[in-house]
Amino acid sequence: MKTILVTIKEPAEDDLVIVEYSSIRGGCTSVKHRIVGAHQRAHADENGIVSKIEDVPAQTARDVATILAGKIRSEWMPEAFEARVHPDTGALIIGCTGLVNDVTFRTSVAGDGGTPVEIAEF
């Protein structure tokens, strides 16, 4: 069983964080998330008139890890992969069962923000 720890540090607005795996047998897949920065959200009343504007903070590293974990749980084979967020550090933890012991994980970031992402295998 292989365990991967993905640590996202200082997420930058509009960067695209990608976590992917490939197998020597030819399979591969990925999950992606574009980081959302601070913005405002308008709330309309029943007549469609904006009644309130709410400030929404930028996504944190824990937010990004939580979204990626949810995508992994719903899009990757659940009998082969499990994903969760470390409660203390907010890092993404991906576990593999014996069904996929020959996989290689990679992370990448697309965009100009320079979001640092570290990956470690245990």
Image (cartoon, rainbow, N blue to C red):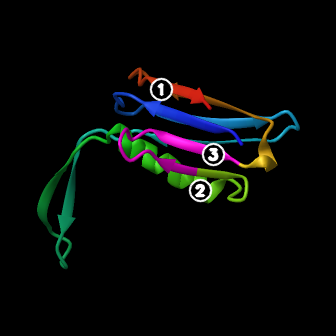
- Of all residues, the one furthest to the left in this rendering is 51
The residue beneath circle 2 is 73
Look at discs 3 and 1 and give the one toward the viewer: 3
Q: Quadrant of the C terminus?
A: top right
Residue type pointed to by label 1: Val
The residue beneath circle 1 is 117
**Image coordinates for residue 97, horizontal then vertical, percent:** 73, 49
Residue type pointed to by label 3: Gly
The residue beneath circle 3 is 95
Give the magenta-colored segment's residue range: 83-96
Element under disc 1: strand
Verify CB contact (< 8 Å) between mark 2 and mark 1.
Answer: no
Determine which quarter of the picture holds residue 25.
top right
Q: Residues within 10 Å of mark 1 (few under 14, many from 20)?
A: some
85 is higher (above) or lower (below) than 74: above
Going from the N terminus, do you reach mark 3 or mark 1 first? Answer: 3
Is 87 situated left or right of 103 in this image?
left
Identify the residue at image location x=38%, y=28%: 9
Residue type pointed to by label 2: Arg
Relative depth, front residue between 8 and 18: 8
Relative depth, front residue between 95 and 73: 95
Is 5 situated left or right of 39 in this image?
right
**Image coordinates for residue 62, horizontal then vertical, percent:** 37, 43
Instruction: Give the distance between the C-alpha atoms of the residues marked 2 and 1, in whole angstroms.
Output: 20 Å
Instruction: Give the distance between the C-alpha atoms of the residues marked 3 and 1, in whole angstroms.
Output: 18 Å
**Magenta region includes residue 92:** yes
Element under disc 2: helix
Q: Residues within 10 Å of mark 3 (few under 14, many from 20)?
A: some
Identify the residue at image location x=56%, y=50%: 83
Element under disc 3: strand
**Magenta region includes residue 63:** no
- Of all residues, the one furthest to the bottom in this rendering is 46
